[in-house]
């Protein structure tokens, strides 16, 4: 059950999370004194059950120029094979994104940011709704745009050590997007995670998806994907949500 919930946390936008709807995040903070709120349904289907969040609420605010404050709230669920369905409030995310290098639009210098996020154990771990202990990721994200193309990614180290089983691990991901029309932006990502438990296995996967812009404020965001390494932990996953920017 813990592996199911870990997958759910990743797909909920831990790096939330651009960011949501992709697992990989970007270095671009929300504009100063503006909000970005992402509300979504997401789930991961594994060999021995399923888990996710109905809904996720990913809230971001431009606290200062180049600084974004983040809070993630999750209505989590889990259903192990042969076990009862559980639903309730999950773990709570709090993070701060700081962009310390701006992109040179005429040259090759990308924008770069750090985005530490901590997950507090507010969910009931015995029912698969939370990790049961505090977890933190310390990532670095980079991004560069070329006309209608945008690419971003990076990675970070998860502080996940808790007992004799759980261990710290690395996460890496990369996204490539293309603006198709004024409304549609589509692309995909690859991501990889080292083993998060003693004797556990590394995992890799991909997502395809993007955004549909109704206007400057309202956006449909979505991804669909699966694992390609340790496939049994992610046979199919999805994220479908609504993004509000104001």
Image (cartoon, rainbow, N blue to C red):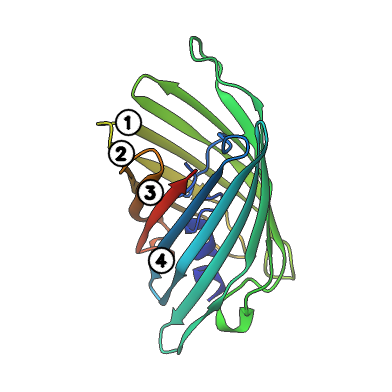
Q: Are marks 4 and 2 in contact (CB under 8 Å)?
A: no
Along the polypeptide, which appears first: circle 1 or circle 4? 4
Along the polypeptide, which appears first: circle 2 or circle 1? 1
Q: Is residue 133 above or below residue 84?
A: above
One can see residue 224 in this view: yes
> How many residues crowd around disc 4 within 10 Å: few (fewer than 14), some, or many (20 or more)?
many
> How many residues crowd around disc 1 within 10 Å: few (fewer than 14), some, or many (20 or more)?
some
Is residue 19 rendered to the left or right of residue 182?
right
Q: Nearer the viewer, mark 4 or mark 2?
A: 2
State the separation of the CA atoms marked 3 and 1.
Answer: 17 Å
One can see residue 17 in this view: no
> Residue, x 74% and y 70% (percent of image)?
163
Q: Are marks 2 and 1 in contact (CB under 8 Å)?
A: yes
Q: Which residue is mark 3?
A: 206
Q: Is residue 112 above or below residue 232?
A: above
Q: Which residue is mark 1?
A: 178
Q: Give coordinates of residue 98: x percent, y percent.
A: 68, 36
Q: Which residue is mark 4?
A: 44
């Amino acid at each position: 059950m813990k592996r199911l919930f870990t997958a759910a946390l990743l797909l909920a936008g831990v790096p939330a999370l651009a960011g949501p709807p992709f697992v990989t995040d970007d270095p671009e903070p929300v504009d100063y004194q503006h909000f970005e709120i992402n509300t979504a349904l997401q789930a991961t289907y594994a060999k021995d059950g399923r888990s996710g969040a109905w809904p996720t609420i990913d809230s971001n605010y431009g606290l200062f120029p180049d600084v974004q404050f983040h809070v993630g709230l999750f209505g989590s669920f889990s259903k192990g094979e042969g076990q009862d369905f559980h639903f309730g409030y999950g773990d709570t995310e709090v993070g701060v994104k700081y962009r310390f290098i701006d992109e040179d639009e005429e040259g090759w210098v990308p924008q770069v940011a750090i985005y530490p996020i901590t997950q507090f154990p507010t969910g009931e771990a015995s029912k698969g709704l939370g990790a049961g202990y505090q977890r933190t990721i310390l990532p670095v994200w980079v991004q560069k745009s070329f006309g209608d193309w945008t690419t971003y990614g990076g990675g970070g180290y998860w502080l996940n050590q808790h007992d004799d089983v759980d261990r710290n691990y690395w996460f890496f991901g990369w996204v490539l997007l293309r603006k198709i029309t004024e409304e549609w932006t589509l692309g995909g990502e690859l991501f990889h995670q080292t083993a998060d438990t003693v004797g556990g296995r590394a995992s890799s996967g991909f997502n395809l998806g993007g955004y549909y812009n109704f206007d400057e404020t309202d956006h449909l965001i979505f991804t669909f994907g699966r694992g390609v390494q340790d496939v049994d932990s992610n046979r199919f996953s999805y994220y479908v949500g609504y993004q509000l920017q104001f």
